[in-house]
Amino acid sequence: MVATSEIIKIGIADLNIANEHQSLRTSGLGSCVGVVIYDAEAGLAGMVHIMLPSSNLFKGSTINKAKFADTGIRELVERLIGNGAHVSRLKAKISGGAQMFQHTTKSDLMRIGPRNVDAVKEELRLLNIPLLAEDIGGKNGRTVEFTLETCMLRIRTVNHGVKEI
């Protein structure tokens, strides 16, 4: 068994890839969704910290692709493939998408967490990437760490302890 030597930290609206001797970690997953996509055979995994469901309303000149489900997941897949992953072997696990605040309005715009989860699942479906496990929803923040050696996503949820999927 080879010990993981390095933890690669993924910030908010950030993405990165790791090899089999590294792990990926992100914290601050409230309404955001942490998406892990991996090819165990190639020894590659990637994580993106999604903040918003769609880049369609973006009006700036320089887009941060990792910020949005539609652009972030595609960018992560491109990087994985560019480093030797094979699209037919890609698998995914997700966590996050909490409804952090209660709102008196029923407006869909205020349901950021559930909208992020829906957008992530739709993008994975469009790319034919199987979603093997999820830990989503609720009202608490999460920190997640993915280790390619075990293909497990370890989730620490505020006030709910630790579990692996």
Image (cartoon, grey):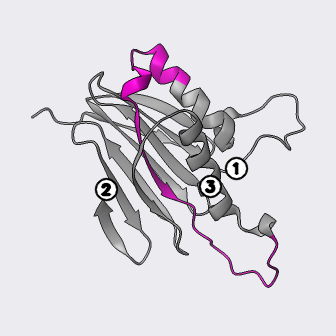
Q: Which mark is residue 70?
A: none
Q: Provide the secondary structure element on which disc 2 rests.
A: loop
Q: Which residues are magenta?
A: 78-107
Helix, strand or loop at disc 3?
Answer: helix
Q: Could you tell me residue 17's position as x and y percent?
A: 44, 29
Q: Are marks 1 and 3 in contact (CB under 8 Å)?
A: yes
Residue drawn 29% across and 25% down?
Answer: 43
Residue 123: x and y, percent? 60, 41
Q: Which mark is residue 165?
A: 2
Label 1 vs 2, first from the N-terminus: 1
Q: Residue at x 17, y 36 (%)?
A: 3
Of tags 1 and 3, which is closer to the observer?
3
Residue 93 on the magenta segment: yes
Pinpoint residue 74: horizontal percent, then vertical percent. 60, 30
Mark 2: amino acid: Ile
Mark 3 neighbour class, 10 Å CA radius: few under 14, some 14 to 19, many 20 or more? some
Residue 29 position (above or below residue 1): below
Is 85 located above or below residue 8 in the figure? above
The amino acid beneath tag 3 is Asp
Residue contact between numbered discs 3 and 2, judged by CB atoms under 8 Å: no
Query: Compared to 2, does 108 lie above or below?
Result: below
Q: Disc 3 to disc 2, how far (Cα)?
A: 19 Å
Q: Position of residue 1 (x, y in %)?
A: 9, 34
Q: Nearer the viewer, residue 70 or 34?
A: 70
Q: Residue 53: which numbered mark, if any?
A: 1
**For numbered disc 1, what is the local secondary structure?**
loop
Give whichever of discs 1 and 3 has the lower sequence position: 1
Tell me which numbered mark, 3 or 2, is placed earlier along the sequence.
3
Q: Name the residue beneath numbered marker 3.
A: 118
The disc labelled 1 sits on which kind of residue? Pro
Farthest residue, direction right = 59
Badge 1 crowding class, 10 Å Cα cut-off, few under 14, some 14 to 19, many 20 or more, is many
